[in-house]
Amino acid sequence: METTTGTAEPVSGELVSVAHALSLPAESYGNDPDIEMAWAMKAMQHAEVYYKLISSVDPQFLKLTKVDDQIYSEFRENFEKLKIDVLDPEELKSESAKEKWRPFCLKFDGIVEDFNYGTLLRLDCSQGYTEENTIFAPRIQFFAIEIARNREGYNKAVYTSVHDEEEKEGNHGREEGTDSGRAEEKGANREREKAKTNKGEEKEQGANKEISRSGETAM
């Protein structure tokens, strides 16, 4: 998977590792005795990695493969009206849908590594990888739909919501700091007023003593 973003925005080493993880071939996963469990765990790791990526970088500028343009062009040529913001599982899993997807997927055999490797795909692109929002799909199907979601702006909902939440937390912290500053200022004002009052009382007491001494002298 490519790690360029199409902007001057730097991509951190952590994100480069994230992007690399998405492009690992199936052979990299070894031959666990319980292969289904191992595969499911790796698929979930891929899902978490991808979600972290689109949460950290504006998805519109991401490149997921070296052939994104070809995948997107072929996808929209074959599935022009497919609604991708919220997927209907029947559009992917029904027998008629499989017949339509099969030739599309096979076009990328030898072009996209492990094109038919099992991957987790979100149904509603504004939500995360929950059990209710996830289905299994071939890797090329995942790439086709996610590239389209990125280019057509649907995945920006994830990026925006994460950054809005971070901004909200930052504003909350600043408000707390402001409130604390106001409380300190009020406390300082009270101390100054108290000091003024004490000085006034001291002056008054001093004046009274002088008056008393003057009266005694006069007598």
Image: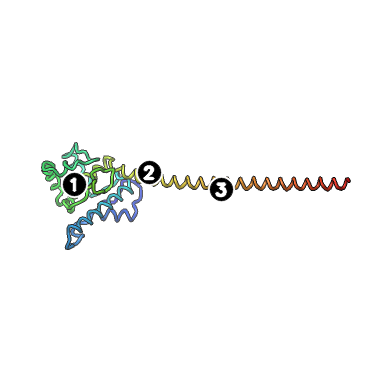
Specify whether 204 is left or right of 213.
left
**Which is nearer the N-term, disc 2 or disc 1?**
1
Disc 2 from disc 3: Cα separation:
30 Å
> Label 2 crowding class (10 Å Cα cut-off): few <14, some 14-19, many 20+?
few
Q: Secondary structure at mark 3?
A: helix
Label 1 neighbour load within 10 Å: few <14, some 14-19, many 20+: many
Labelled disc at residue 141: 1
- For disc 3, the neighbor class at 10 Å (few under 14, some 14 to 19, many from 20) is few
Q: How many marks?
A: 3
Toward the right, the furthest residue is 219
For the residue marked with disc 3, what is the amino acid? Glu
**Could you tell me which secondary element the residue under label 2 belongs to?**
helix
Q: Residue furthest top?
A: 81
Q: Position of residue 19 (x, y in %)?
A: 28, 53
| Mark 2 residue type | Asp
Front-most of 86 and 63? 86
* Mark 3 and mark 1: Cα distance apart in space: 59 Å
Q: Residue at label 3?
A: 184
- Residue at image position (15%, 48%) is 108
| Label 2 sits on residue | 164
